Amino acid sequence: MSPLNFLSGINHTIIGNLVLSVWCFWVLLLAGACSSDRSSTVFEKVHSEDSGITFANHLTPTEEFNMYLFRNFYNGGGVAVGDVNNDSLPDV
């Protein structure tokens, strides 16, 4: 007994239309996600002169501390701003 035996009673035109519809849906979804409209960004760059925050993540690889031993060696250290204590003011 074939595992696709349940398809024997279904009109193959319906299956073809369903497959085509699903394919078109994914193409349209991906095309919409790849739009070049960058005017509605969520974040904006703030220069250190304006924010008063200066940060530099200078890494010096050594034999004991390097990207081969520590996978996230270059990913680390950064600055984030958010309202952690819920006082409507940005926390660094």
Image (spheres, rainbow, N blue to C red):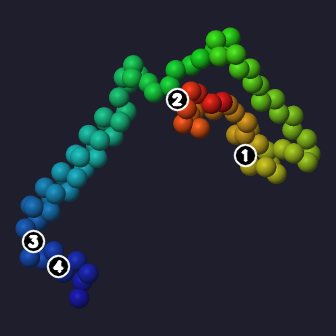
| Residue that label 2 marks | 88
Residue 30: x percent and y percent?
A: 33, 40
Mark whose residue sits in front, 3 or 1:
1
Dots 1, 2 in contact, CB < 8 A: no
Image point 37% across, 33% down: which residue?
Answer: 34
Q: Which mark is residue 6?
A: 4
Residue type at mark 3 is Ile
Circle count: 4
Q: Is residue 44 above or below residue 32?
A: above
Neighbour class for label 3 at 10 Å: few (<14), some, many (≥20)?
few
In which quadrant will I find the C terminus? top right
Amino acid type of the residue tagged 4 in the rendering: Phe
8 left or right of 59?
left
Q: For mark 2, does the 10 Å Cα neighbourhood hold few (<14), some (14 to 19), or many (20 or more) residues?
A: few
Q: Quadrant of residue 7?
A: bottom left
Compute the Cα span from label 2 to label 3. 59 Å
Classify residue 52 by image quadrant. top right
Is disc 1 placed on a helix, strand or loop?
loop
Left or right position of 41 against 1:
right
Task: Tell me the amino acid under the disc marked 2.
Answer: Ser
Task: Give the mark nearer the N terminus: 2 vs 3.
Answer: 3
How far apart in space, not on screen, are marks 3 and 4 (Cα)?
Answer: 8 Å
**Residue behind mark 1:** 72
Name, please, the residue furthest toward the bottom.
Answer: 1
Contact (Cβ within 8 Å) of mark 3 with mark 1? no
Question: In the rendered structure, are the residues bearing label 2 and label 3 in contact, judged by CB atoms less than 8 Å apart?
Answer: no
On residue 10, the disc is: 3
